[in-house]
Amino acid sequence: MKKMTIQEDLKEKGLKSTKHRMAILDILVKKDHPISAEQIFFEIQEMDVAINLSTVYRNLEVLVEKSMVTKLTLSGDNRSVYEYNRMVHRHYLICLGCKKILAIEHCPIKKYEQQIESETDYKIVGHKLDLYGYCPECREK
Amino acid sequence: MKKMTIQEDLKEKGLKSTKHRMAILDILVKKDHPISAEQIFFEIQEMDVAINLSTVYRNLEVLVEKSMVTKLTLSGDNRSVYEYNRMVHRHYLICLGCKKILAIEHCPIKKYEQQIESETDYKIVGHKLDLYGYCPECREK
DNA sequence: GATGCAAATACAAATCATTTGCATCATTAT
DNA sequence: ATAATGATGCAAATGATTTGTATTTGCATC
């Protein structure tokens, strides 16, 4: 698969490239950790672009559906966060102090999945692993 | 720590043992997988005990606070589920077909946690690992 | 067993994130 | 340029959960 711009990617997936959709993707592409719909909403307004929160949600929904964005729910928070789908499998380290989210690329689960598959006779298609702790700054308090 | 009844446990934690609280705990103790507040609410009504949903939520809240119950949020569902805290570390295997939840006791994460601790300088206090897949019945479809 | 007080409950209303209906507007294929 | 289809704004609906408040109940004490 050759490199394509976000616009081309949208077109290929049958999505129009509107300024709102582009703004949402721009923001997500720049982040290396997931953020909430509301944060996206605020950041777009800071760019002096008027947008409605439901537009953010609706866009996130289609982008998730088209696999351009990943939606995740982290324990202890009632809202979802979203990140640009870079097609890499990731885990998260969430600071229980400041709620900061760090992405981690190394995954230790492959063998475990196979083992559970044979033990349970389930077909395992994915997993979610989040670590919780305290970042260096919050650790001091 | 010697064995104690649920009533003694409640008393020790400064909680009164009401019929509602007992009913909630009875239900959770019997389940080997987490269930939602609403499910608990329905099951109590099936026992011909009148109860209000907010009572269920308020009880779950104090029981979580006192570590008698564990609250968890599974990906793709907007509601929380609760289980009796048996003081064992568990993971979950969620069927994407029928949403059935299976608890798994084996945990492969210890070494990984240590590794991430030294890489990130975070103090890791816990983690959450859920597997997603299809159970034997749903796999056929 | 009766009493008092704090904790627990019912009920309705509030909240918070998210979704939806619908009229209007913008993007893109033709 | 135009039409068709998809995207947006706005307000209202939703669904899970929380909260305010008046009333009731559990339980330690008399």
Image: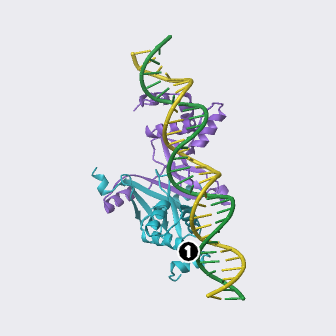
Chain colours: A purple, B cyan, C yellow, D green
Q: Residues within 10 Å of mark 1 (few under 14, many from 20)?
A: few
Q: Is residue B101 above or below residue A45?
A: below
Tell me the chain of label 1.
B
The residue lying toward the viewer, choosing from D16 and B137, is D16
Residue shown at 63%/39% (left/top)?
Answer: A42
Q: Which residue is mark 1?
A: B18
Residue shown at 62%/56% (left/top)?
Answer: A135
Position of B19 compared to B131: left or right? right
Place of residue B18 in the rendered image (x, y in percent of width and height, measured from the top left): 55, 74
Position of B53 compared to A109: left or right? right
The residue lying toward the viewer, choosing from B39 and B116, is B39
Q: Secondary structure at mark 1?
A: loop
- For the residue marked with disc 1, what is the amino acid? Thr
Q: Is residue B112 among the parts visible in the rendering?
A: no
Place of residue B51 in the rendered image (x, y in percent of width and height, measured from the top left): 52, 66
Place of residue B113 in the rendered image (x, y in percent of width and height, measured from the top left): 51, 60
The residue lying toward the viewer, choosing from B87 and A38, is A38
Place of residue D2 in the rendered image (x, y in percent of width and height, measured from the top left): 47, 13
Residue shown at 42%/31% (left/top)?
Answer: A13
